Amino acid sequence: MAGFTEEHVEQWRTEGWVLIPELVPAEAIDAALDDMWRVLPTPEEFHAGEGGSRQDAFLGGTDQRRLFSEHDRPDEDGPAFRNEQFLGQAMFPFPGSNRLNRLIVHPNMVGFAEAAIASTDLLIYQMSIWAKYTGVANYEQPHHQDHNHSVVPPRTEPDYWFMEGFLYLSDVDEDVAPTHAVRVSDSGGGMEVGVRTPEQAPELYAAERSAAGPRGSYLAYRPDVWHRGVNLEREGGARFLYGISFKQANQDWVGYTNVQPRATTPRFVRFVESCTPRELALFGVPLPGHAYWDEPTIDAMAARYPGLDIEPWRAGLGSGPTGSGSPGCR
């Protein structure tokens, strides 16, 4: 259980959410930041207006902004969803050294998901980074549960668990918008559509706890957890998260980020070529020995991803699936 404890697993299972400080070592985060700065401006660049094209998505009129809701654009202060809160998102895979891409399969994080969900047959279904900068928006949100990860109402029994999560790519201190979440023992559990304002549910706001933590921490939560974003208060501040979420492989109704349209892009090819069979299984690639594979299909896989070690698939022909257990790194 590298980087986490049985207590972390138990808290996620019983209370719905847990923050695991420095689950991924800070050195691994720091080594990946140059790749992120190719996509997003640094806080210093952004607040100096020197982010160039990387800054364009945060500027200009509302027609340049990611639409969250056509009818919920409040002008008043207070907790509310605002379109501008959802700027600053970028989808996997990313350019650069491949270190930012490799964080998504870090064995500590995958190992925790496997232990908490009690399954090694998992898929990564969300993979995007999200930046927030002081002054772009009022980031104060109402309490809500995430219903937009499933096309059916989520069930909360263990057989149907899936894990939403954010890996911290920067130190998320109290003044740079740490997520606030409520333990299910305080909320009563269950799923409810809609938001809850302070006037509607003062008990949720009284029971919420901050998920502030250093870079490398992982905030893992279930869909039945009431949570909300809060505003950035630090002058010149910023916050960077990596949305990395896991589901059981048979949960076809759960999803968020679709990587198939990017499966032949140079960035994705480079990522695939750095992976083991078990890591690729997290993206739906059948393990060696699966009935999907025959010699022509393995040859085609080798042609698509020339740098991938294809020998495990050749060795697995006719043997049944292999490679169970937590993924390793190459």
Image: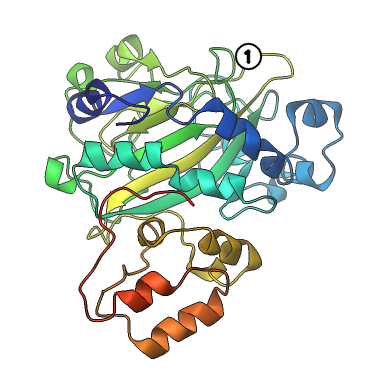
Rendering coords of residue 199 (x, y %): 36, 16
Image-based side of 127 in relation to 187, left or right: right
- State the image quarter where residue 240 is shown: top right
Say above or below: 3 vs 66.
Answer: above
Image-based side of 294 in relation to 251, left or right: right
Give the residue displayed 48% in from the left and 34% down from the top: 167
Image-based side of 265 in relation to 321, left or right: right
Q: Nearer the viewer, residue 127 or 120?
A: 120
Rendering coords of residue 90 (x, y %): 61, 48
Amino acid type, callout 1:
Glu
Can you see residue 69? Answer: no
Q: Residue furthest bottom?
A: 296
Say above or below: 241 vs 253.
Answer: above
Query: Looking at the image, how many numbered discs can be counted on the residues?
Result: 1
Give the residue displayed 44% in from the left and 43% down from the top: 244
Rendering coords of residue 277 (x, y %): 38, 62
Q: Residue furthest top?
A: 206
Quadrant the N terminus occupies = top left
Rendering coords of residue 25 (x, y %): 50, 28
Can you see residue 230? Answer: yes
Q: Nearer the viewer, residue 45 or 120?
A: 120
Q: Secondary structure at mark 1?
A: loop
Identify the coloring.
rainbow
Say above or below: 106 vs 319.
Answer: above
Q: Residues within 10 Å of mark 1 (few under 14, many from 20)?
A: some
Give the residue displayed 69% in from the left and 20% down from the top: 237
Q: Nearer the viewer, residue 280 or 160?
A: 280
Give the residue displayed 85% in from the left and 27% down from the top: 48
Q: Which residue is mark 1?
A: 233
